[in-house]
Amino acid sequence: MESLSSMLWPPPLNSSPHKCSPMAASATAISFLSFASMPSHQQRTTTPKRTSNPTKTLSSTTATTITTTISTTTDTTTSLPPKKVLVPIGFGTEEMEAVIIIDVLRRAGADVTVASVEPQLEIEASSGTKLVADTSISTCSDQVFDLVALPGGMPGSVRLRDSEVLQKIMKNQAEEKRLYGAICAAPAVTLLPWGLLRRKQTTCHPAFMDKLSNFWAVKSTIQVSGELTTSRGPGTSFEFALSLVEQLFGESVANEVGQLLLMSTADDNPRKVEFNKVEWSVDHTPRVLIPVANGSEVIEVVTIADILRRAKVDVVVASVEKSVQILAAQGTKIVADTLIGDAAESIYDLIILPGGIAGDERLHKSKILKKLLKEQGSAGRIFGAVCSSPAVLHRQGLLKDKRATAHPSVINKLAKEPVNGAKVVIDGKLITSRGLASVTDFALAIVGKLFGHGRARSVAEGLVFEYPRS
């Protein structure tokens, strides 16, 4: 079987790193966002319920536009400390899972600490993205967390398993009946050897299901069993993270975060529409450039890079800043592969701009990137943008006579009549997407255009992401 690793918006830029010590209660503003609830096809099982804080399935609502605040406080108490969450990472951790868990929980108002189980804070994740932790796991050993959530990936799950400090934290978490969760390989590879799955119905990545007890193993997308929540893989990370938000903060907060993520029902919008269809054929390994900046949307950067690398695309993540280390949206730190000046020495079959309002402005101001994009369009090569970044292409005159989509906050600013509703829009050699929860569809659409439907479906299967068979 092919190895799992091969299958497998923004705070102020001067915000301080998250530490294990308590932070002031935080809030996330949600504005101008259209909402539809979690996909109805996703199966979610809960067994047995916790009496103190039962979990409920996220309810469906009609599409609406809201301006509201997600708060960590209750109706009767205004001074509760923020919910503390620990997300440990190690070499080979699955990057999509890690950043989606971190990002979604921070949007909900959680104080999330990213802790490395390695001697250093910078780790290379399973598909090559470099993540930078906030602290070392050793500094968290005496802390109390409302939730500890383990991303999967290989060998990342093994690295987590072999951390004695993390094992102690997790066992205390379970013994004191506080929330803990794991996704992908981590339930079977990390929690099982620690004895933390006993008498718990559990799910995990299909490649590791045979390691679970047949009596307690289930194939649900999300499985809640008491304090334990498990899920299947990168393609179920949004649902996993929202389930954790619901258990920490309640159903209404989870629904509001779902709106922010642009979660939609299965039949709500078409996955993809295409105009002026042309082939995207290349006679070599496709080369893709993803420029990034402080404030770029980390979910989009990491998801696109991860999925394209799984499809055997040569992906270069290039910083338009003076340093390769990027402080992305929601305070997540990543390390680019190179600086934009060095990346500009090569020609790319496709240039993709991630979203993030603060990041977009910095991308737009990059003279080197502006030149690259102009050359890309003049040469008839492919370019794309997700979330708010199609506005960057528009400002540079690259959307003239093109059909496109974008984040609801910017879509009406595009040059030509925008395509509302569709998750992904392709017009000739331009591809755009609404962003966030639709970014997986965006990346898989690129794989399909470059290599064909079969490879896109194969990559989707490794992600445990539902993808049309034809």
Image (cartoon, rainbow, N blue to C red):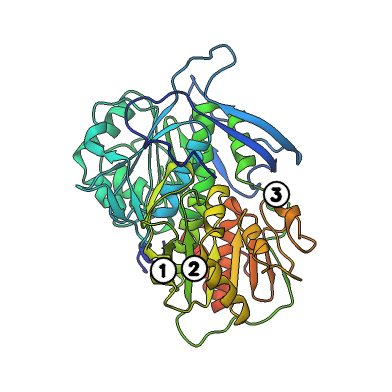
Which numbered dot is residue 2? none
Which residue was labeled with disc 1? 341
Question: Which residue lies at the image location 35% right of the left edge and 65% below the top edge?
Answer: 3
Q: Nearer the viewer, residue 377 or 160?
A: 377
Q: Secondary structure at mark 3?
A: loop
Kind of residue sitting beneath label 1: Gly
Q: Which of the two discs, 1 and 3, labels the residue nearer the N terminus?
A: 1
Question: Which residue lies at the image location 65% right of the left edge and 55% below the top edge?
Answer: 434
Which residue was labeled with disc 3? 408
Q: Nearer the viewer, residue 431 or 360?
A: 360
Which residue was labeled with disc 2? 368
Q: Secondary structure at mark 2?
A: helix
In contact (CB < 8 Å): disc 2 and disc 1: yes
Kind of residue sitting beneath label 3: Pro
Horizontal and vertical percent position of residue 425 = 69, 65
Real-space CA distance between mark 2 and mark 1, rounded to the nearest whole angstrom:
7 Å
Q: Secondary structure at mark 1?
A: helix
Horizontal and vertical percent position of residue 167 = 24, 37
| Disc 2 packing (10 Å; few <14; some 14–19; many ≥20) | some
